Image (tube, rainbow, N blue to C red):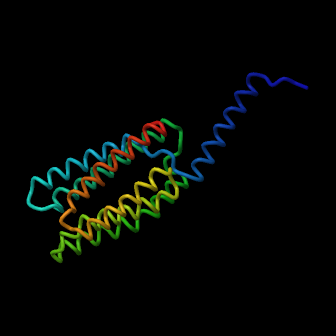
Amino acid sequence: MTIPTHEDRESAKETLAYIRRTMESASSFTAVSGWGLIMVGFVGLLAAWLAWSGTHDADLRIWLPTAGISIALACIFNIRKAKQTDVPIWSGAIRRLVWVMAPALAAGAVLTVALARGGSEHLLPGMWLALYGAGVTAGAEFSIRAIRWMGVSFLLLGAAALLEPGAGLLLMAAGFGGLHVVIGLDIVMRHGG
């Protein structure tokens, strides 16, 4: 029987690390950044405060830039975490995640225009929360468990906002602000940032 050399052991370690990364990227997207979600939550809380200070809850001049900034922050932080954890950012799992989230988010964009034109801005908070929750819940099939619970929570907040439009701003602050921060902190503690 031969004893493996140092080079053999190092080669085996590299091979196992490659297999692990390949399996992770094939099955789930593990580079969700808790810090990114926390930052998105703070942006959501700031937007809610600005909307509360203004004339109406679903002020598109506030919430549309907020969505753009939040998407950019999430991308930057997720890419950074993927690089730190050596997980491919554009893996099969992330492509599937984007593919299943896109229809709900696209529907939200079209409905935003339609409801705003139709004078039904009071329905926007519930619709935004519900469709974001639907997209996140669908995408959670390719991510960690905390994301699934975040999606379900957004769906429930959306339903509550649609049934009680007067609470829309409070529920958006709770979801787009508080829920992102809470789930982000959970991910930081359990999944390393």
Counting from the top left corner in percent of width and height, residue 101 is at 42, 62
Q: Is residue 79 above or below residue 55?
A: above
Residue 50 shown left or right of residue 123 in the figure: left
The residue under the point 35% across, 59% down is: 154
Residue 17 shown left or right of residue 147 in the figure: right
The residue under the point 26% across, 65% down is: 161
125 vs 18, nearest the viewer: 125
Counting from the top left corner in percent of width and height, residue 89 is at 49, 47
- Identify the image quadrant of residue 127: bottom left
The residue under the point 52% across, 58% down is: 141
Counting from the top left corner in percent of width and height, residue 103 is at 40, 68
Q: Residue furthest bottom?
A: 118
The residue under the point 27% across, 55% down is: 67
Q: Residue furthest right?
A: 1
Counting from the top left corner in percent of width and height, residue 54 is at 9, 56
Q: Split into 4 quadrants, where in the image is the C terminus? A: top left
Q: Is residue 70 above or below residue 4?
A: below
